[in-house]
Every structure is written in structure tokens, then in C-alpha cells.
């Protein structure tokens, strides 16, 4: 599946200025444009897949290892003392960019970030 106008495809192909800071064979990591916390990072497959369910099983291990490496690096760089991993899949779950991506959100004590909650909760 391809999407010529997909912003994350463009970032993955390094067609825009503020591109990936880390990459593996099939994944890239770059900073979220509207971070909820300092160091908020997105991990995306280089190929255009829409949700987790579209990402081939054979990329699963590489994806998890890549997420771990990026999270480790964010911790080493003192962006957080812990981190959340979040993935929104399809619109009803809050997915806005229709190119599969994993959020890595570094966390610090008392930062006030709340990632998954019910309205009013
Ligand atoms: P979603 O709600 O789809 O899981 O999150 C999409 C994320 O992509 C949002 O956190 C948003 O800030 C980020 N984002 C959207 N457009 C761009 C962009 O052009 N560049 C970067 N770096 N991040 C973007
Ligand atoms: Zn794409």
C-alpha cells in the first residue's frame, strides 16, 4: 500500500528537513512535531503500513528491538526516568496520521502527562 502524500513516508525517505535521528533496515525514529513531553519520539516503518495489523510478522522482532534501542537512548540522554509506549490504531482510537507509528514518551516525576484515560477520569 502506498500513499504519495504521506508525511511519515516523506520523513522516512529523508525528503524533509527535520528527519530521522536513528534508523534500522526497516524502521526510523524522529521527534514528534507536537511533543507531549521533551524527547517525545515516533517510530515508524520505512514502508507505508496503516496500522499494527498491516505490519508483516517478520518485522515484529526488528520493530521491538528498535523501540527498545530508541527508548534506551532517550533514557541515556536523560529525557526521562521512564517512558510510555503508545500506539493509536485507526481513527476511533485516536490515529490521526494513517502511517503506522509507535509513540515513545519519556516520563519524569510530576510531569502531568496522561496518555490513556477516560473523559473526566
Ligand atoms: P496519532 O494521533 O496519529 O497517533 O499521532 C500522530 C502524531 O504525529 C502526533 O503526535 C503529531 O504531533 C505527530 N505529527 C503529525 N504531523 C507531523 C509532522 O509533520 N512531523 C512530525 N515530526 N510529527 C508530526
Ligand atoms: Zn506513509
Image: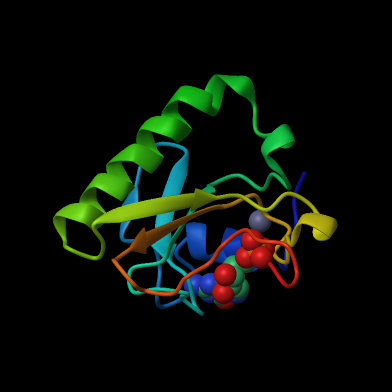
> Which residue corresponds to the image point at 26% horizontal and 62% vertical from the top-left?
80
- Residue 31 location in percent, x, y? 41, 68
Quadrant (top left/top right/bottom left/bottom right) for the N terminus: top right
Residue pictured at 69% horizontal, 44% vertical:
49
* Residue at image point 49% right, 77% down: 33
As drawn, the residue found furthest toward the top would be 58
Which residue shows up at 60% across the image and 44% down it?
47
Circle count: 0
Q: Determine the residue located farthest toward the right in the rendered image.
A: 92
Q: Residue furthest toward the front?
A: 121
Taking the image as shown, residue 77 lies to the left or right of residue 84, namely: left
Instruction: Using residue 12 as the reference point, say whether residue 55 is left or right of it.
Output: right
**What x and y, as percent, mark residue 116?**
62, 58
Using the image as rendered, state which of residue 91 and residue 27 is in the foreground: 91
Q: Position of residue 18 (x, y in %)?
A: 40, 75
In the image, 105: left or right of 10? Answer: left
Relative to 89, say whether 54 is above or below: above
Quarter of the image with the C terminus is bottom right
Task: Give percent across and percent down for residue 17.
Answer: 41, 78
In the rendered view, would you say 15 is above or below 49?
below
In which of the image's four quarters is ligand 1 placed?
A: bottom right
Report the front residue among 97 and 47.
Answer: 97
Depth check: give the residue in front, 48 or 29: 29
| Position above or below: 71 against 21 | above
Q: How is the image coloured?
A: rainbow
Q: Quadrant of residue 96 in the image?
A: bottom right
Amino acid at each position: 500500500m502506498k500513499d504519495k502524500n504521506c508525511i511519515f513516508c516523506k520523513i522516512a525517505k529523508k525528503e524533509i528537513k527535520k528527519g530521522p535521528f536513528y534508523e534500522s533496515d526497516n524502521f526510523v525514529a524522529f521527534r514528534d512535531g507536537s511533543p507531549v513531553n521533551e524527547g517525545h519520539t515516533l517510530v515508524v516503518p520505512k514502508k507505508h503500513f496503516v496500522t499494527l495489523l498491516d505490519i508483516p510478522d517478520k518485522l515484529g522482532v526488528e520493530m521491538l528491538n528498535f523501540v527498545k534501542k530508541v527508548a534506551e537512548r532517550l533514557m541515556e540522554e536523560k529525557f526521562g526516568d521512564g517512558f510510555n509506549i503508545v500506539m493509536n490504531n485507526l481513527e476511533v482510537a485516536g490515529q490521526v496520521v494513517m502511517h503506522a507509528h509507535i509513540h515513545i514518551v519519556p516520563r519524569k516525576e510530576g510531569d502531568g502527562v496522561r496518555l490513556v484515560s477516560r473523559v473526566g477520569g
